[in-house]
Amino acid sequence: MHSQAPSMTDPISSRPAFERLPPLDRSTDSSAAAVTPQALRDADPAQARAATDALTPPQLDRLRDQVDALPLADRDTLAQDLAGKLDAPQLQKLEAAFGHDTIASAVERSSGPQVRDAYAALPQGDGDGLVDKLKQWLGLSPSSQDDTREISASVVNPDSGEVNDAVWTVDSEGRPIHAEGTLRTVFSKLERSDAETDAQGAAADRGIEGDQGGHVFGHRFVTDQGLKNLFPQNGNFNMGAYKTLENEWAAWVDKGMDVQISVDLAPRNVDRPDRVRISYEVIDPSDGSRVYDQRVSFDNRAGQHYDRVDGSQMDDMIAAG
């Protein structure tokens, strides 16, 4: 079984990742600066409950960004710590930042019997309404979800027979809002069709000056897929940080690993997403073990940065265990 690698952003640090995160931005809500994973972890139970009760939808959105940046092990540890000192309503509220499954597992492991029973009795997705408000803030309201549909594709490499699978969730206008894929091969020296080039132009036209038609999954992974795989993406971001991330995926695949990816574009139901959230896991197909996982959130603007794993680090992770 392969061991999980430390955070890419600080591969030699032994401190938990949430201790190394920067404070939240004060520009839109001055009280948000104190609401960090570390602050919640370090607060006593009364302080943690009060801080969670006071969280607004925008603050939960920013907290989610920091939680998403944590390695899975650190995120689970933090959720279990909070489950030991928060009451059921606060724990349900934090589902918006951690996800329901993570909080539910933490409650089962770390909460007392009264909190477990109270949490189990709460209506799913109800609570004090903050989860629904956050979903609306992100464009995830039930009405918007009803207008979505899934489109899947499997792309076979004729040389190796390996298959890349992808599923896109698109809104009523065909714009991608979520995508999941498993990469097992890379298509090299593959030309784009005229239709794909035209679709890239159409996607760019939905954006602002400086945008390109950016691929959710790079063309080298899923070939020509048209508008379902395209969104208006800042050109500097597309050719810089996002390409670096895609190069990392390709390098893992070249080393014989499977790469399982999830991408969220937010907010939904708009022509141009402001944010791109990505999580991915590297799976060794020989035994199904997880070699590495990463979560990253980008703004759809110039100046984004991504520090990729180099080849020697990949070799060490694959050989570990």
Image (cartoon, rainbow, N blue to C red):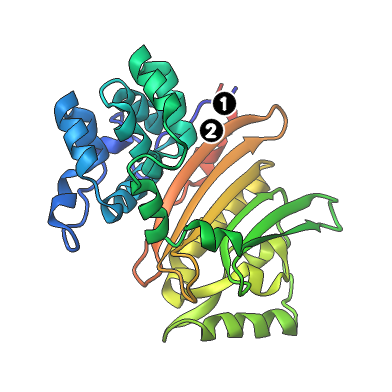
Q: Is residue 175 above or below residue 128?
A: below
Is the residue under label 1 in contact with that under label 2 (CB below 8 Å)? Answer: yes
Which dot marks residue 2? 1
In the drawing, does residue 171 fall left or right of residue 166?
Answer: left
Q: Position of residue 27 (x, y in %)?
A: 17, 63
Q: Position of residue 191 (x, y in %)?
A: 73, 75
Q: Is residue 252 above or below residue 115?
A: below
| Disc 1 secondary structure class | loop
Q: Position of residue 1 (x, y in %)?
A: 60, 22
| Disc 2 secondary structure class | helix
In the drawing, does residue 205 fall left or right of residue 184?
Answer: left
Q: Which residue is mark 2?
A: 317
Answer few, some or many: residues within 10 Å of disc 2's Cα (few below 14, many 20 plus, some between 14 and 19): some
For marks 2 and 1 on the same chain, the one whose residue lies earlier in the sequence: 1
Q: Is residue 284 above or below residue 105?
A: below
Q: Residue at x 84, y 51 (%)?
A: 160
Task: For the C terminus, give its image quadrant.
Answer: top right
